[in-house]
Image (tube, grey):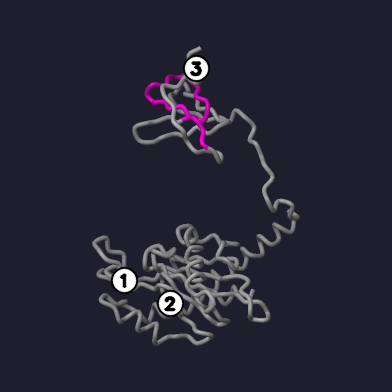
Amino acid sequence: SEMEDLAASPPRTRKIFTEGEWREAGIFRREALKSGNRVAGPALVIEPNQTIIVEPGWQAEITARNHVLLRRTEKKRRQAALGTEADPVMLEVFNNLFMSIAEQMGVTLQNTAYSVNIKERLDFSCAVFDRHGALVANAPHMPVHLGSMDRSVETIIRLNSGDIHPGDVFALNAPYNGGTHLPDITVVTPVFDDARKEILFWAASRGHHADVGGTAPGSMTPLATTVDEEGVLFDNFRIVDRGRFREKELETLLTDHPYPARNPHQNVADLKAQIAANEKGVAE
């Protein structure tokens, strides 16, 4: 039939990477498909404004209303993954335990923040990471923050290897090292063992500061041609050194700049709130 011929003999093919390997996929133009046609995956159905990927084990069918309907035609092959022998009950217990820590960090940050941006608009995120900077758990905060925060933690680990002590806290907003835009400042705190020798986890919080300098209020000008025109760059700044809050150095960083922060007092207050949020995570 026409449907079978279309599925078996696409106009052309191309290799695509899917399900862990390269596979030969049929290429179909959307306008050439008619009602009732079926296309078996792997295949690409190309439209003027989008491309529909039909994965292996799936089938695309053109309905009577000229819609593309995707159906699974083969049962999904499941493979046992490493670590799946864990007790599912205990796994869920610890999953909720770590997520609860991140949520409590968020409550602390909201309650202690100074700016409307963080306290009322809730533009912040908190998460817990393992000793290598991999995400362990996060609260349901801002996805754009959480998607790259692990890179910020990994940067702090890499740039301070051998020089991280109990009581240290670091700040970073560099877009080259896991940051988003400059107003999003990430505060990272190591969690040591009881002997205060080995790092077990990292607690991190990222908050959107109302302004960090730059040529325009809000530090998000589309006209910037250098990072300085966007605002003050925090790149591996040790904001707390063995328990001492480096307020003078922080104020210097915020103000000694071609385009300084417009309200450094607010920045300092919000950064203190982020440090407090991380300490809540450390305590838990």
Q: Earlier in the sequence, mark 2 or mark 3?
A: 3
Helix, strand or loop status at disc 3: helix
The residue singled out by tag 2 in the image is 237
For discs 2 and 1, the disc positioned in front in the rendered view: 2
The three-letter code of the residue at mark 1 reads: Gly
- Residue 6 spot, x, y in % from top left: 47, 19
The disc label shown at residue 231, or none = 1
- Residue 58 spot, x, y in % from top left: 55, 30
- The quadrant the C terminus occupies is bottom right
Helix, strand or loop status at disc 1: loop
Q: Eyeballing the image, is 214 above or below 54?
A: below
Q: Quadrant of residue 13?
A: top left
Q: Earlier in the sequence, mark 2 or mark 1?
A: 1
The disc label shown at residue 79, or none = none
User: What's the distance in space between the residues labelled 1 and 3, CA to CA?
Assistant: 59 Å
| Label 2 close to label 3 by CB (< 8 Å) | no
User: What's the distance in space between the residues labelled 2 and 3, CA to CA?
Assistant: 63 Å
Q: Eyeballing the image, is 22 above or below 126?
A: above
Identify the residue shown where x is 69% and y is 45%.
Answer: 80
Residue 164 is a magenta residue: no
- Residue 61 spot, x, y in % from top left: 50, 25
- Which residue range is magenta in the image? 22-43
Q: Name the side, left or right, on which 94 lies relative to 174.
A: right
The three-letter code of the residue at mark 2 reads: Phe
| Label 1 close to label 3 by CB (< 8 Å) | no
Identify the residue shown where x is 65% and y is 36%.
Answer: 77
The three-letter code of the residue at mark 3 reads: Met
The residue singled out by tag 3 in the image is 3
Identify the residue shown where x is 39% and y is 26%.
Answer: 29
